[in-house]
Image: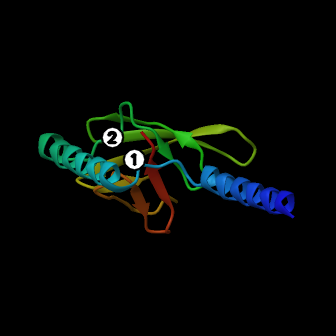
Amino acid sequence: MARVLAVMLMALAFVQGSALDSEEDRPKGARRRQMERTRAAELEAAIAKSGCADLGGEKWFSDAHGELFQVKQDKCSISFQLKKKSGEMYEKKGVVRGTRVLVEPPFPEGQMLPNQTVMWESGARWERKW
């Protein structure tokens, strides 16, 4: 009986442990809030300096499909690569005005949030990963 109980407790521990591993790896608590404050300050500084949010440089974003990509930015003009269903890559261009992100149609208008996530009018989002 004791062996059965021990086996059941071990199985329960493994199940709980695997549930913790499957959770998305992200900062929690004070670290998350500090990261959000830092990104909001970066956004405000970029807008004060150049008149537009900075999406370029070493920043990586995740699109609605979970694909990682980088945005190239020259002053307030942006360009980025997208993948067609066939797997072929093509380039889109746009402009950033303050926190508004405007891309060639058929892209909807986007808004950069204080945590540097771009939220599109369609409900899709580009989340900054690092």
* Furthest residue in direction left, as rendered: 48
* Furthest residue in direction front, as rendered: 2
Amino acid type, mark 2: Ser
Specify whether 6 is left or right of 25: right
Q: Position of residue 1 (x, y in %)?
A: 87, 64
| Front-lying residue, 38 or 89 | 38
Q: Position of residue 75 (x, y in %)?
A: 26, 36
For numbered disc 2, what is the local secondary structure? Answer: strand
Residue at screen point 44% across, 68% down: 121
Give the mark nearest the N terminus, 1 or 2: 2
Specify whether 87 is left or right of 50: right
Q: In which quadrant of the rendered image does the C terminus lie?
A: top left
Q: Is residue 104 visible?
A: no
Provide the residue designation for mark 1: 94
| Front-lying residue, 87 or 14 | 14
* Furthest residue in direction bottom, as rendered: 122
Provide the residue designation for mark 2: 77
Other-residue count near label 2 (Cα within 10 Å), few / some / many at <14 / 14–19 / ≥20: some
Residue at screen point 35% across, 31% down: 57
**Residues under numbered marks 1 and 2 in contact, where contact means CB atoms less than 8 Å apart:** yes
